[in-house]
């Protein structure tokens, strides 16, 4: 299943959650979301929970961790 | 096409269901607002994806009750996935009973089925539905004779005290390739699921008979948008599944889509106004229950009673010989995955094990502490070469011998400088794994997402959580002694 995180196409397993996609994109970004340092939103700007279900083509946005 | 081939049968079922569905939730008392005489208000409260989280329900109940005291036309809806996530709910007897008690107490009016509502098995769901004081809807499932649950009504029609006629259609999410909801298939035996959008469109006729047409869905926001485009008759979609906290509604065509996050943090509220039974205004918002102060004392008392569940102290197994350290506990965890999911092999990263010793009386609480993250197991098809790439990643990015395994053993062959030369794989019969063969391999979703390795296809969630596999495994006959043996080793080669 393909979704995008910050416009980067990510391939995740079927049945994956928002957290799975974030971890695939960047384990550091996922950790920051889990600790509450930043939030993850969908393409309408709605807050989505890390255990939310994903569908093909979903688009997520998360603040990139500081480099 | 499967849909077309069975449409005759489906429509016969639909007609039967329509008869059943003269579900009279109707609060059929004397009209306080004769239609046409003045504007009629309707308030809809909604939740979704509670996943057993009951801590906010007393505040939720207080808000709903406050509205019911001043407005006779209030609806309270659940868009599914009420179970799985809170051990006090998951391990109650019968499983999920607290959600039933609380929903009945809070006067839930309607619920639609979510994929996780099947996770306790159909018998538990059948019991839940039979004792619920509210209809549980699902239009896109057909229960065959071997299914255990009763055929759910596809929709309900209600008539409010103000004389409004409301139709509510229930739809559940379907995986596009499996044509099943995201749930372990063992729990879906005897059930046939149909495309959500196509099924929804068959019920467009409900619009003609009603003043308000609602889809109560467990599809996820992405799919709800598709539904809104396909069913322009819908006034409102009250959704779930994607755990989206929609602090403002989304309008697609003329349809308003709402969803209330997850785990009970928010209560959705929709205010509708009708003039001569014509919808003239609608407003939707989320109420943040962290900020709501008052609790309903009766619901709070029920929640307190539920949280005092002695079941979590119940002994799952007694270990005469303790299991200690990452190797022994990793062997236990990977055996639980491989046996429970009937796979060829299983892997678990040692960092995912949060307890270092299991001994004596092992309780449910101990097992939840061992696997606190609710990790699900993901299944991949992998060749021996793919498996080597997984082990190599672990060695190079985590630590040598970090990966615990079941269904095979492995040896890391290292050069004098410590570099990895080769990974030798042996099957359970101590013979080398046949190179061309494809194996079914399970691992937790952390590894599935973070680790980089070769595999045949993207993999699929088993929709079984590690903690549940472990509980089931330990309730069986487990010989502890073989778990003491190391299944991975390092062989250092000379120059």
Image (spheres, coloured by chain):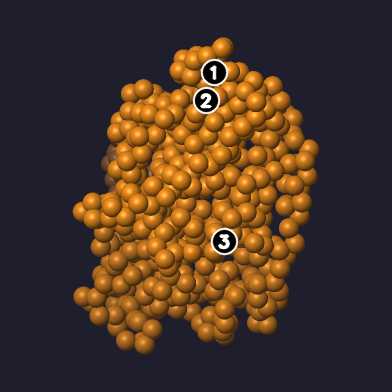
Chain colours: A brown, B orange
Image point 56% across, 53% down: which residue? B129
The C terminus of chain B is located in which quarter?
bottom left
Q: Secondary structure at mark 2?
A: loop
Q: Which residue is mark 3?
A: B124
Badge nearest the viewer, 3 or 2: 2
Residue B233 lies left or right of residue B79; in this view the side is left
Image point 38% across, 29% down: which residue? B208
- Is disc 3 in contact with disc 1, using a CB cutoff of under 8 Å? no
Q: Of callouts 3 and 1, which one flags the residue occurring earlier in the amino acid sequence?
A: 1
- Is disc 2 in contact with disc 1, using a CB cutoff of under 8 Å? yes
On screen, B196 above or below B361? above
Residue B480 lies left or right of residue B11; in this view the side is right
Residue B32 position, x and y percent, is 64, 20
Image point 35% across, 34% down: which residue? B205
CA distance separating discs 2 and 1: 8 Å
Q: Please check whether the numbered discs 2 and 1 fall on a single chain.
A: yes
Residue A22 lies left or right of residue B473; in this view the side is left
Badge nearest the viewer, 3 or 1: 1
CA distance separating discs 3 and 2: 35 Å
Q: Which residue is mark 1?
A: B35
Q: Please check whether the numbered discs 3 and 2 fall on a single chain.
A: yes
The reply to whether residue B185 is visible in this rendering is: no
Dot 2 surroundings within 10 Å: few (below 14), some, or many (20 or more)?
many
Q: Secondary structure at mark 1?
A: loop
Image point 62% across, 54% down: which residue? B131
Q: Secondary structure at mark 3?
A: helix
Quadrant for residue B225, please give it.
top left
Q: Nearer the viewer, residue B207 or A7?
A: B207
Dot 1 surroundings within 10 Å: few (below 14), some, or many (20 or more)?
some
The reply to whether residue B36 is visible in this rendering is: yes
Q: Which residue is mark 2?
A: B164
Badge nearest the viewer, 2 or 1: 1
């Amino acid at each position: 299943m393909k979704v995008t995180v910050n416009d980067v196409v990510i391939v995740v397993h079927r049945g994956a959650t928002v957290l799975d996609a974030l971890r695939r994109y960047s384990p550091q970004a996922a950790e920051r979301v889990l600790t509450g340092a930043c939030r993850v939103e969908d393409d309408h700007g709605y807050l989505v929970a890390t255990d939310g279900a994903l569908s093909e083509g979903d688009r997520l946005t998360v603040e990139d961790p500081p480099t | 096409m499967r849909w077309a081939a069975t449409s005759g049968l489906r429509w016969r079922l639909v007609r039967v269901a329509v008869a059943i569905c003269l579900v009279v939730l109707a609060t059929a008392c004397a009209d306080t607002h004769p239609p046409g005489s003045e504007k009629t208000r309707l308030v809809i409260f909604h939740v979704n994806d509670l996943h057993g989280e009951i801590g906010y329900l007393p505040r939720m109940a207080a808000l709903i009750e406050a509205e019911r005291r001043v407005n006779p036309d209030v609806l309270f809806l659940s868009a599914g996935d009420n179970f799985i996530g809170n051990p006090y709910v998951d391990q109650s007897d019968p499983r999920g009973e607290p959600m039933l008690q609380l929903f009945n107490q809070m006067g839930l009016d309607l619920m639609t089925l979510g994929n996780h509502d099947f996770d306790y098995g159909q018998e538990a769901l059948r019991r839940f539905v039979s004792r619920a004081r509210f209809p549980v809807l699902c239009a896109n499932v057909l229960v065959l004779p071997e299914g255990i649950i009763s055929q759910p009504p596809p929709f309900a029609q209600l008539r409010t005290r103000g004389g409004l006629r409301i139709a509510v259609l229930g739809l559940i999410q379907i995986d596009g390739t499996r044509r099943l909801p995201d749930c372990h298939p063992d729990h879906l035996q005897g059930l046939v699921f149909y495309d959500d959008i196509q099924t929804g469109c068959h019920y467009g006729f409900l619009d003609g008979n009603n003043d308000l047409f609602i889809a109560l869905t467990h599809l996820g926001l992405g799919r709800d948008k598709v539904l809104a485009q396909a069913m322009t008759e819908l006034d409102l979609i009250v959704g779930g599944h994607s755990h989206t906290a929609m602090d403002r509604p989304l309008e697609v065509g003329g349809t308003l889509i709402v969803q209330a996050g997850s785990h009970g943090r928010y209560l959705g509220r929709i205010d509708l106004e009708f003039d001569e039974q014509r919808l003239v205004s609608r407003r939707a918002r989320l109420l943040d229950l962290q900020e709501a102060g008052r609790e309903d004392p009766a619901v709070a008392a029920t929640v307190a009673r539920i949280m005092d569940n002695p079941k979590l102290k119940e002994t799952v197994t007694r270990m005469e010989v303790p299991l200690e350290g990452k190797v022994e506990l990793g062997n236990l965890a990977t055996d639980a995955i491989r046996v429970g999911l009937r796979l060829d092999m299983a892997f678990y990263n040692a960092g995912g094990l949060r307890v270092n010793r299991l001994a004596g009386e092992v309780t449910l609480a101990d097992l939840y502490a061992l696997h606190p993250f609710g990790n699900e197991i993901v299944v991949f098809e992998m060749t021996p070469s793919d498996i080597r790439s997984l082990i190599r990643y672990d060695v190079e990015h985590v630590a040598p011998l970090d990966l615990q395994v079941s269904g095979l053993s492995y040896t890391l062959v290292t050069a004098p400088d410590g570099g990895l030369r080769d990974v030798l794989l042996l099957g359970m019969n101590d013979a080398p794994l046949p190179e061309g063969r494809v194996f079914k391999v399970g691992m937790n979703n952390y590894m599935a997402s973070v680790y980089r390795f070769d595999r045949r296809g993207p993999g699929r969630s088993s929709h079984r959580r590690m903690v549940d596999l472990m509980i089931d495994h330990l309730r069986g006959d487990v010989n502890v002694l073989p778990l003491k043996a190391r299944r991975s080793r390092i062989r250092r080669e000379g120059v």
